[in-house]
Image (spheres, grey):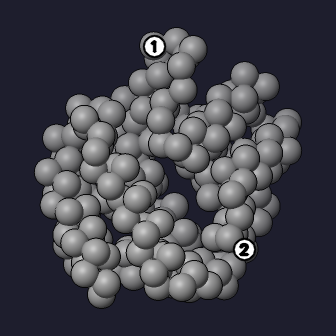
Amino acid sequence: MIPAPLLKGLRTRYAEPQRHYHTWLHIEAMLKHFRRWEDEFHRPEPVLWALYWHDAIYDPAARDNEEQSAQLLEREASGHLTPENTAFAAKMIRATAEHVVPPGLNAQDTADLALFLDLDLFILGAPKSVYDRYEADIRAEYAFMPDDAYRTARTAILQGFLSRERLYFTQQAHREWEETAGANLERAIAVLEQGE
């Protein structure tokens, strides 16, 4: 259980004006999928903390949001999580920077981290209208970028996901979202390349 004062502080952070997609609604959507698959996690408690804190620090112009969010979790989890679980939750948050499962974990932690990363990308496999709203919200978060620069950067990010052998690491996410996610990414890249 996460203490109410910490959740209140997080809600304030997720309501910051620069956010359009990375809001409390994103956390609630991830929570819905977490609860569906909670029994799949070997260590659900640190996963839940990572889920709440993974975008707690969010400045679209910064390059260290994940690191700053992980450090915030390490401070705020003190006295609430064991040091081992705190370290694992922070590792999960840091892994969202590249969306790659880091090496050196045991099999159970590897599985937990993989499913956590898949939950963070559920939006890629959302229905077309929901995905298109997501793309519009991301553009709003990067409103400070000129159109050409944004299109180039965003296309590279989406191509990176599309070029993976598998977008989702786990079987359950792959089955549920992979096909739709591929179609969404291809469509979004085409729109960006057309300069729309």
Name the image quarter holding the C terminus: bottom left
Residue 190, relative to residue 6: is it above or below? Answer: below
Residue 9, relative to residue 34: is it above or below? Answer: below
Point 73% across, 47% down: residue: 67
Q: Check disc 2 and report the residue beneath it.
A: 12
**Residue 2 placement (x, y as % from top left):** 68, 48
Q: How far apart are marks 2 and 1 (CA)?
A: 36 Å
Q: Which of marks 2 and 1 is nearer the N terminus?
A: 2
Q: Check disc 1 and report the residue beneath it.
A: 107
Q: What element carries label 2?
A: helix
Quarter of the figure with residue 14: bottom right
Residue 20, relative to residue 152: is it above or below? Answer: below
Residue 91, relative to residue 191: is it above or below? Answer: above
Evaluate whether residue 21 shows in this view. Answer: yes
In the image, taking residue 177 as reference, residue 120 lies left or right, namely right
Evaluate whether residue 3 shows in this view. Answer: no
